[in-house]
Image (cartoon, rainbow, N blue to C red):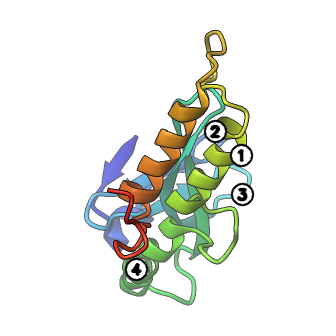
Amino acid sequence: MKTIKFTPAKLAGLKHPTGTHPEKWFDAGCEGLAIFVQPEPSLKKSYYAHWSKATIGKDGKKKTSGRYKYLGRFGGVKNLEAIKAYVVVNLPIWKAGNITTNSVKTVRSLRAEYKNAGAATGFRVKAKGTKIKYKKKTSDGYMGLLDTYVLANTVKESTNSSF
């Protein structure tokens, strides 16, 4: 990973690579800002915003992948300071992703998935290993704990007079 402090003079002095892939330079002074220097035939330099997105794979391991957003050409309409200000303001929004969709995992949606996949079938939810069948009382206990301590759904004390 090549990191430098972006100044107009340093960016103008970046040499174009001779290979087939662009060189990626990252700004040491502004989180999330990069410049791609295209190889010989193109000779263009472009600003990009960059961040990483974490996902959980089917095997249960955390995986991260890089995301890039094109911001404009070096020497174009926007100067370096305008690009930096734009990245600082919008980077948290880009990192959050599209939070209006139903594909975002919440505690409530994970609980519903567990109820349908784990508690309903009575088997332990696990990617590896043998299936272990839970007793009905164990599954009910897990769902009660999830409702009470994770989702904070409790039964009103006036209706719970079984003590």
SS at mark 2 in the image? helix
- Which residue type carries mark 4? Leu
Residues 153 and 51: in front is 153
Q: Which badge, 1 or 3, is on the more N-terminal residue?
A: 3
Give residue 116's mark: 1
Q: Quadrant of the N terminus?
A: top left
Label 3 crowd (10 A; few <14 / some 14-19 / many >=20): few
Numbered label attached to residue 42? 3
**Are discs 2 and 1 less than 8 Å apart at CB?**
yes
Residue 20 in view (yes/no): no
* Three-letter code for the amino acid on which mark 1 is drawn: Asn
Tell me how far mark 2 sits from mark 4, CA to CA: 55 Å
| Left or right: 57, with 7 as reference point | right
Q: Nearer the viewer, mark 1 or mark 4?
A: 1
Residue 26 position in % (x across, y down): 40, 55
Q: Can you identify the residue that label 2 sits on?
A: 119
